[in-house]
Amino acid sequence: MRTLLSLALIFGFSATSFAQYGELTGLKLLKPEDKEDIKSTPAPQGAIVLFDGKNLDKWSKQDGKTAAHWKLVDGGAMQVEKPGNIITKDKFGGAFKLHVEFRVPYVAEGKGQGRGNSGVYVQGRYEVQVLDSYGLESKNNDCGGIYEVAAPLKNVCKAPTVWQSYDIEFTAPKFENGKKTEPARMTVYHNGVKIHDDVKIPVDNTRAGAGGDPATAGPILLQEHGHQVQFRNIWVLPSK
Ligand code: MG
Protein backbone atom coordinates (compact mmCIF):
# COMPACT_ATOMS: atom_id res chain seq x y z
CA MET A 1 0.00 0.00 0.00
CA ARG A 2 2.75 2.37 0.98
CA THR A 3 4.66 1.47 -2.20
CA LEU A 4 1.59 2.12 -4.31
CA LEU A 5 1.11 5.45 -2.63
CA SER A 6 4.76 6.39 -3.17
CA LEU A 7 4.52 5.40 -6.82
CA ALA A 8 1.38 7.48 -7.23
CA LEU A 9 3.15 10.42 -5.64
CA ILE A 10 6.23 10.00 -7.80
CA PHE A 11 4.26 9.64 -11.01
CA GLY A 12 1.80 12.33 -10.03
CA PHE A 13 4.64 14.72 -9.29
CA SER A 14 6.62 13.99 -12.43
CA ALA A 15 3.50 14.27 -14.57
CA THR A 16 2.93 17.76 -13.15
CA SER A 17 6.55 18.81 -13.61
CA PHE A 18 6.60 17.48 -17.13
CA ALA A 19 3.32 19.10 -18.09
CA GLN A 20 4.76 22.51 -17.18
CA TYR A 21 7.24 22.31 -20.08
CA GLY A 22 5.41 19.70 -22.13
CA GLU A 23 2.40 19.83 -24.43
CA LEU A 24 0.35 22.99 -24.71
CA THR A 25 -2.90 21.10 -24.29
CA GLY A 26 -5.89 23.40 -24.61
CA LEU A 27 -3.85 26.48 -25.60
CA LYS A 28 -5.10 28.43 -28.61
CA LEU A 29 -2.02 29.21 -30.70
CA LEU A 30 -2.35 32.58 -32.50
CA LYS A 31 0.48 32.06 -35.04
CA PRO A 32 2.69 29.02 -35.68
CA GLU A 33 5.89 30.99 -34.89
CA ASP A 34 4.65 31.63 -31.36
CA LYS A 35 5.77 28.06 -30.72
CA GLU A 36 9.32 28.66 -32.01
CA ASP A 37 12.10 29.53 -29.59
CA ILE A 38 13.94 32.79 -30.23
CA LYS A 39 17.49 32.28 -31.43
CA SER A 40 19.92 32.66 -28.55
CA THR A 41 22.05 35.83 -28.89
CA PRO A 42 25.71 35.26 -28.00
CA ALA A 43 27.35 37.78 -25.70
CA PRO A 44 29.09 40.42 -27.85
CA GLN A 45 32.66 41.53 -27.32
CA GLY A 46 33.01 43.63 -24.18
CA ALA A 47 29.99 42.04 -22.50
CA ILE A 48 30.05 40.72 -18.92
CA VAL A 49 28.60 37.22 -18.97
CA LEU A 50 26.40 36.69 -15.92
CA PHE A 51 25.05 33.23 -16.75
CA ASP A 52 26.11 30.82 -19.46
CA GLY A 53 24.47 27.66 -18.13
CA LYS A 54 27.53 26.24 -16.38
CA ASN A 55 27.15 27.52 -12.82
CA LEU A 56 25.67 30.22 -10.61
CA ASP A 57 29.05 31.63 -9.53
CA LYS A 58 28.09 35.19 -10.52
CA TRP A 59 24.94 35.03 -8.36
CA SER A 60 23.95 34.92 -4.70
CA LYS A 61 20.79 34.95 -2.64
CA GLN A 62 19.35 38.41 -2.06
CA ASP A 63 21.38 38.78 1.15
CA GLY A 64 24.43 39.16 -1.10
CA LYS A 65 26.34 36.53 0.92
CA THR A 66 24.74 33.10 0.56
CA ALA A 67 25.30 30.97 -2.54
CA ALA A 68 22.46 31.15 -5.07
CA HIS A 69 20.07 28.21 -4.61
CA TRP A 70 18.26 28.08 -7.96
CA LYS A 71 18.54 24.87 -9.99
CA LEU A 72 20.67 24.27 -13.06
CA VAL A 73 18.52 22.45 -15.61
CA ASP A 74 18.93 21.01 -19.11
CA GLY A 75 19.52 23.33 -22.03
CA GLY A 76 22.03 25.61 -20.28
CA ALA A 77 19.30 27.10 -18.14
CA MET A 78 18.51 27.79 -14.50
CA GLN A 79 15.12 27.40 -12.90
CA VAL A 80 13.52 29.43 -10.14
CA GLU A 81 13.62 27.61 -6.84
CA LYS A 82 11.95 28.60 -3.57
CA PRO A 83 12.63 30.42 -1.35
CA GLY A 84 13.82 33.73 -2.58
CA ASN A 85 15.20 35.94 -5.30
CA ILE A 86 18.76 35.82 -6.57
CA ILE A 87 21.02 38.76 -7.42
CA THR A 88 24.26 39.24 -9.28
CA LYS A 89 27.39 39.76 -7.21
CA ASP A 90 28.31 42.58 -9.61
CA LYS A 91 26.53 45.90 -9.39
CA PHE A 92 25.79 48.06 -12.39
CA GLY A 93 25.46 51.81 -12.71
CA GLY A 94 25.45 54.36 -15.51
CA ALA A 95 24.10 53.13 -18.82
CA PHE A 96 24.16 49.55 -20.05
CA LYS A 97 22.30 46.94 -22.03
CA LEU A 98 21.05 43.78 -20.32
CA HIS A 99 20.23 40.66 -22.32
CA VAL A 100 18.13 37.93 -20.70
CA GLU A 101 16.48 34.84 -22.19
CA PHE A 102 13.59 33.25 -20.34
CA ARG A 103 10.65 30.92 -20.64
CA VAL A 104 7.55 30.47 -18.54
CA PRO A 105 5.87 27.16 -17.71
CA TYR A 106 2.43 26.31 -19.00
CA VAL A 107 0.13 26.46 -16.01
CA ALA A 108 -3.25 25.89 -17.63
CA GLU A 109 -5.18 26.31 -14.38
CA GLY A 110 -3.34 29.52 -13.37
CA LYS A 111 -4.88 32.96 -13.71
CA GLY A 112 -3.54 36.52 -14.01
CA GLN A 113 -0.38 36.97 -11.93
CA GLY A 114 -0.48 33.25 -11.09
CA ARG A 115 0.90 32.03 -14.43
CA GLY A 116 4.65 31.83 -14.73
CA ASN A 117 5.38 34.92 -12.67
CA SER A 118 8.98 36.07 -12.17
CA GLY A 119 10.76 39.27 -13.08
CA VAL A 120 13.99 40.94 -14.07
CA TYR A 121 14.82 43.85 -11.75
CA VAL A 122 17.45 46.21 -13.12
CA GLN A 123 19.65 47.57 -10.30
CA GLY A 124 17.43 45.42 -8.07
CA ARG A 125 14.84 48.23 -8.32
CA TYR A 126 13.06 48.42 -11.67
CA GLU A 127 11.13 45.32 -12.71
CA VAL A 128 10.47 44.22 -16.24
CA GLN A 129 7.76 41.67 -15.57
CA VAL A 130 8.05 38.03 -16.58
CA LEU A 131 4.67 36.31 -16.81
CA ASP A 132 2.62 34.12 -19.09
CA SER A 133 0.62 36.88 -20.78
CA TYR A 134 0.27 35.04 -24.08
CA GLY A 135 -2.55 36.41 -26.22
CA LEU A 136 -3.73 38.98 -23.67
CA GLU A 137 -4.22 42.72 -24.04
CA SER A 138 -1.16 43.66 -22.00
CA LYS A 139 -1.35 45.89 -18.95
CA ASN A 140 1.54 47.39 -16.97
CA ASN A 141 1.74 44.27 -14.77
CA ASP A 142 1.84 41.83 -17.69
CA CYS A 143 4.85 40.29 -19.40
CA GLY A 144 7.02 43.09 -20.81
CA GLY A 145 5.45 45.65 -18.47
CA ILE A 146 7.69 47.93 -16.42
CA TYR A 147 5.79 46.90 -13.34
CA GLU A 148 2.95 49.32 -12.55
CA VAL A 149 4.77 52.01 -14.57
CA ALA A 150 4.25 51.25 -18.25
CA ALA A 151 2.44 48.62 -20.32
CA PRO A 152 4.36 47.26 -23.31
CA LEU A 153 3.57 49.03 -26.60
CA LYS A 154 2.41 45.66 -27.91
CA ASN A 155 2.10 42.09 -26.75
CA VAL A 156 4.79 40.08 -28.53
CA CYS A 157 4.78 37.18 -26.08
CA LYS A 158 5.51 33.73 -27.34
CA ALA A 159 3.51 30.81 -26.04
CA PRO A 160 4.42 29.46 -22.60
CA THR A 161 7.32 26.92 -22.60
CA VAL A 162 8.91 28.74 -25.57
CA TRP A 163 12.20 30.67 -25.17
CA GLN A 164 11.90 34.47 -25.33
CA SER A 165 14.30 37.37 -24.85
CA TYR A 166 14.57 40.80 -23.31
CA ASP A 167 17.10 43.39 -24.35
CA ILE A 168 16.89 46.20 -21.84
CA GLU A 169 18.76 49.48 -22.51
CA PHE A 170 18.92 51.12 -19.14
CA THR A 171 20.13 54.52 -18.00
CA ALA A 172 20.40 55.04 -14.26
CA PRO A 173 18.83 58.13 -12.69
CA LYS A 174 21.06 61.15 -12.18
CA PHE A 175 21.52 63.05 -8.93
CA GLU A 176 23.10 66.36 -8.04
CA ASN A 177 23.76 67.23 -4.40
CA GLY A 178 21.43 64.42 -3.34
CA LYS A 179 18.59 65.65 -5.54
CA LYS A 180 17.31 63.63 -8.49
CA THR A 181 17.74 65.61 -11.68
CA GLU A 182 16.93 62.82 -14.19
CA PRO A 183 14.79 59.72 -13.65
CA ALA A 184 15.87 56.22 -14.67
CA ARG A 185 15.08 55.42 -18.33
CA MET A 186 14.48 52.19 -20.21
CA THR A 187 14.11 51.07 -23.78
CA VAL A 188 13.07 47.42 -23.97
CA TYR A 189 13.01 44.93 -26.83
CA HIS A 190 10.97 41.76 -26.30
CA ASN A 191 11.79 39.01 -28.78
CA GLY A 192 13.54 41.70 -30.85
CA VAL A 193 10.52 44.03 -30.98
CA LYS A 194 10.66 47.43 -29.27
CA ILE A 195 8.03 47.45 -26.53
CA HIS A 196 9.26 50.48 -24.53
CA ASP A 197 10.82 53.55 -26.12
CA ASP A 198 12.98 55.51 -23.67
CA VAL A 199 10.39 55.37 -20.88
CA LYS A 200 11.10 57.63 -17.91
CA ILE A 201 10.55 55.74 -14.68
CA PRO A 202 9.06 58.09 -12.09
CA VAL A 203 9.67 55.82 -9.07
CA ASP A 204 12.90 54.69 -7.38
CA ASN A 205 11.70 51.13 -6.76
CA THR A 206 8.90 49.14 -8.34
CA ARG A 207 6.80 46.76 -6.23
CA ALA A 208 8.79 44.12 -4.34
CA GLY A 209 12.08 45.57 -5.56
CA ALA A 210 15.20 45.56 -3.40
CA GLY A 211 15.19 49.35 -3.02
CA GLY A 212 18.29 50.97 -1.61
CA ASP A 213 19.83 54.29 -2.56
CA PRO A 214 18.81 54.96 -6.19
CA ALA A 215 21.92 57.12 -6.62
CA THR A 216 24.09 54.01 -6.29
CA ALA A 217 24.73 51.07 -8.60
CA GLY A 218 22.68 47.92 -8.06
CA PRO A 219 22.63 44.25 -9.05
CA ILE A 220 20.47 42.41 -11.55
CA LEU A 221 17.78 40.64 -9.50
CA LEU A 222 15.71 37.70 -10.72
CA GLN A 223 12.43 37.19 -8.89
CA GLU A 224 11.19 34.04 -7.20
CA HIS A 225 7.40 34.09 -7.31
CA GLY A 226 6.85 30.41 -6.70
CA HIS A 227 6.70 29.45 -10.36
CA GLN A 228 9.11 27.29 -12.38
CA VAL A 229 10.32 30.03 -14.72
CA GLN A 230 13.65 29.36 -16.46
CA PHE A 231 16.47 31.70 -17.55
CA ARG A 232 19.47 31.28 -19.82
CA ASN A 233 22.20 33.35 -21.51
CA ILE A 234 22.34 36.51 -19.39
CA TRP A 235 24.87 39.26 -20.08
CA VAL A 236 25.43 42.96 -19.62
CA LEU A 237 27.09 45.27 -22.12
CA PRO A 238 28.19 48.54 -20.53
CA SER A 239 27.69 51.62 -22.71
CA LYS A 240 30.82 53.35 -23.90
MG1 MG B 1 7.06 39.56 -11.25
Image (cartoon, helix red, strand yellow):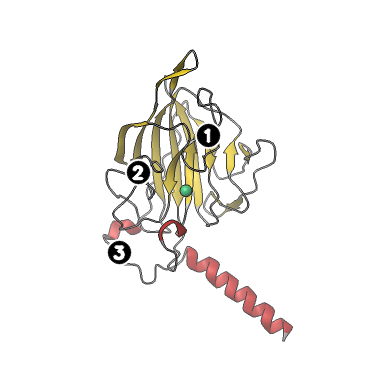
The image shows residue 240 at horizontal and vertical percentages of: 42, 19
What residue is disc 1 on?
49
Assign a secondary structure to mark 3. Answer: loop
Residue at (28% x, 54% y) in the render: 137
Give the labeled residue for mark 3: 29
Q: Is mark 2 within 8 Å of ligand 1?
A: no
Provide the residue designation for mark 2. 190
Inter-mark Cα distance, 2 to 1: 20 Å
Q: Quadrant of the N terminus?
A: bottom right
Upstream in sequence: badge 3 or badge 2: 3
Q: Does residue 60 appear to the left or right of 143 in the view shown?
A: right
Question: Which residue sits furthest bottom?
Answer: 1
Decide: few, some or many residues near mark 3? Use Cα within 10 Å; few <14, some 14-19, many ≥20. Answer: some
Cβ atoms under marks 3 and 1 closer than 8 Å: no
Question: In this rendering, is residue 159 above or below 164?
Answer: below
Q: Between 176 and 35, which is closer to the camera in this rendering?
A: 176
